[in-house]
Amino acid sequence: MILALDAMGGDHAPTEICLGAISACSKYPDLEVVLVGDGSQIERVIKDAEPFVSKRIHVVHTDEYIAMDESPTVAFRKKKRASIRLAMEMVKAGDAQGCISAGNTGAIVAGGVLILGRIPGIDRPGLGVPIPLPNKITLLIDVGATIRCKPINLYQFAIMGEIYMRNTLGVKSPTVALLSNGEEEIKGDEVVCEARNMLAKANVEFIGYVEGKDIPLGVADVVVCDGFTGNVLLKFVEGVGEALYRLLREEMDQRILPKVGFLFLIPMLKELWNRFDYEKYGGTPLLGVEGVVIKAHGRSKARAIDSALKVARDFVMNRGVELIRNGLDRGGM
């Protein structure tokens, strides 16, 4: 299996991206990775890889890449040899089975639509993020691909999210909910209310509305919202986690007893960290496009890129795009 990896995308590119590719190829003998980016920088990182790994890592050189602060659509159209664009063109041409990038989210979404195209019947793609909870995983979709949504978009996110959870993450009968400002049927704006009426008739286990407080409790397997709300919510959750960690460190630095007690808490804290560590899950699938596209966190280091490559590999092996394409009819579309 060949996967194209945007070596220039993300805060720690290209070093950590290349190290992640080496790590993934070390684990999966069937995996080949094409690193797309500045060839000289890439070669410096991969030159020390073991021979059985290095022979499965290839380089496609380009001087162009799309920065995080660039206008996605404008940059994607102007930079014909941008690293993320070349990676997607490899998927389109059949030279790679999927592509991964930790770069500009807007550029990834634009590229997915412009280069790969949408699955027939899908109006807008959605980014679905698996949120690790104490005893399960909840998929939050959308988290930034489609900022302003129509009811049909939310409906399609729900169908695609249900298919992804059932076939890729192995949840037998995923429950689906809409994020709203209350659980009662009278809550929600016109878009959310109309999407609720559509999902009530769909062939999915729709449980109605959930509030933000319900997400950490694992009330639903798939939680659907527009990309603006989902992105804000996701960043808030990340910020709360970092704030709690800093608060704990400050308290330990100021007091003696917490330092002593912390020694006994270390095993439990490590277990909690492992459960909520985003690097374990690596990447977010762009659902609804005609190809495997995985968006990794912009801060991804080698371990997260390794995990993102695994997500892409699993999605290809599970025929994720085909299952979504075939499953749309089952959802009532």
Image: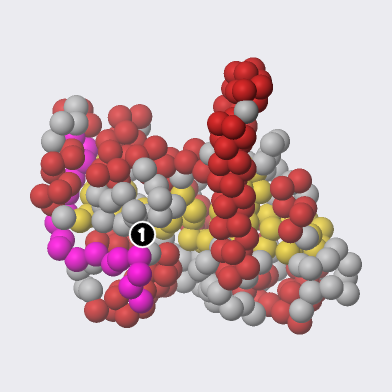
Q: Position of residue 267 (x, y in %)?
A: 60, 20
- 195 with respect to 139 (left or right): right
Q: Position of residue 29 (x, y in %)?
A: 31, 31
Q: Residue furthest left?
A: 40
Choose between 120 and 72: the one closer to the eye. Answer: 72
Quarter of the image for the N terminus: give it.
top left
Q: Position of residue 313 (x, y in %)?
A: 41, 43
The vertical placement of 135 against 138, above or below, is above
Question: To which quarter of the image does residue 54 belong?
Answer: top left
Does 66 lie within the magenta span?
yes
Residue drawn at 62 percent across, 34 percent down: 251
Label 1: element kind: loop
Q: Amino acid at mark 1?
A: Gly
- 248 with respect to 295 (left or right): right
Residue drawn at 74 percent across, 58 percent down: 212
Prevalent SS, magenta region: loop
- 55 with respect to 204 (left or right): left
Residue drawn at 26 percent across, 56 percent down: 8
The vertical placement of 288 against 75, above or below, is above
Label 1: few (<14), some (14–19) or many (≥20) C-alpha neighbours in 10 Å: many
Residue drawn at 35 percent across, 40 percent down: 302
From which residue to which does the magenta span run? Answer: 54-71
Residue 332, can we see it?
Answer: yes
Q: Which residue is mark 1?
A: 103
Does 87 lie within the magenta span?
no
